[in-house]
Image (cartoon, grey):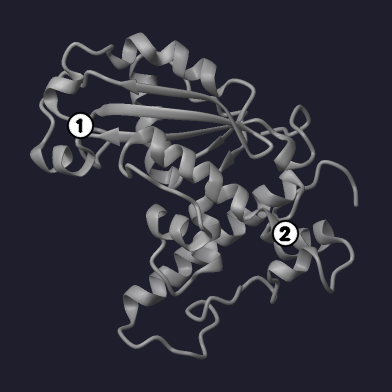
Amino acid sequence: MSLNNWPTHWFDMPLAVFDLETTGKDYKTCEIIEIGIVQFYRGEVIKVYDWLIDPECEIPQEIVELTHIRQEDVDGQPKLRDLAPEILNAFAGHGIVAYNVNFDRPFLTNKLEALGYKWPSDNPVIDPLVFAQHFYPNQRNKLGMVAERLGVSLEGAHRACNDAEATGKVLYAFRDKLPPELETLLILQAQWERENMERNRWRRRSDSPDETNPLINGQTAAKGITTAFAYDTEPDPLRALYAAVPNAAPRNKL
């Protein structure tokens, strides 16, 4: 993915924050019942899209209880095939943000591809959950919990637009802890995601975490690099980051 056509600083990039409500967790067998997209620019909400979608199947009772979306709410609503062009248009020219994007993106990608559409793979993708897991490694990091921790309002959780708006505000709330450059942010996000996965793997293996294990203690494993790399001992944050992530190639020489 080339970043040449995107702003140098991620704060200057228009964002399309999205969230899905679905009939279940398996994108192969379950369907989307609601999609919310909230467009932000420099921390401000610009436009909101909220679509209830006819899944053409029955909504399980546990999903009704979680989302308060009833069968009668979606029966007769537009089907995903009718909304796909409008959804993709809402993403166009925006960085894409989702909380736990590894759930939402495969789900939406699979459904779009089944209809003959493609996920906008040239758009940068940001997942605030990765940052939450890094900054709060020993805490539960569901969206509502992180929002409360950061003083972000979340009313009507488990409705797509409400969750999407809260996700965008959580990302902006992390701004002072994140590098300003988009390219640096995306590389750091990939590094932290790997570290989070490794930390969780160790936790699953051990009932009594080894306090000498840096992954379990929430420290970074990549040559001792921490969030301070971008602001403290290393005068050139990109140089420090590329040294820690050998396979990352900058667009221009340092």
User: In terms of secondary structure, where does tag 2 sit?
Assistant: loop
User: In terms of secondary structure, where does tag 1 sit?
Assistant: loop
Residue 16, percent across and down? 55, 30
Residue 145, percent across and down? 40, 60
Q: Which mark is residue 246?
A: 2
> Three-letter amino acid code at disc 1?
Ile
Q: Residue at x 27, y 20 (%)?
A: 53
Residue 195, percent across and down? 53, 66
Above or below, 166 relative to 109? below
Observer-nearest residue: 159 or 185? Answer: 159
Q: Quadrant of residue 161?
A: top left
- Tell whether 162 sits left or right of 219: left
> Three-letter amino acid code at disc 2?
Pro
* Marks 2 and 1, the one that precedes in the sequence: 1
- Tell whether 164 sits left or right of 91: left
- Tell whether 254 sits left or right of 17: right
According to the picture, the residue beneath numbered tag 1 turns out to be 69
Q: Residue at x 53, y 76 (%)?
A: 218
Residue 46, percent across and down? 59, 26
Above or below, 216 relative to 183? below
Q: Which mark is residue 25?
A: none
Q: Quadrant of the N terminus?
A: top right
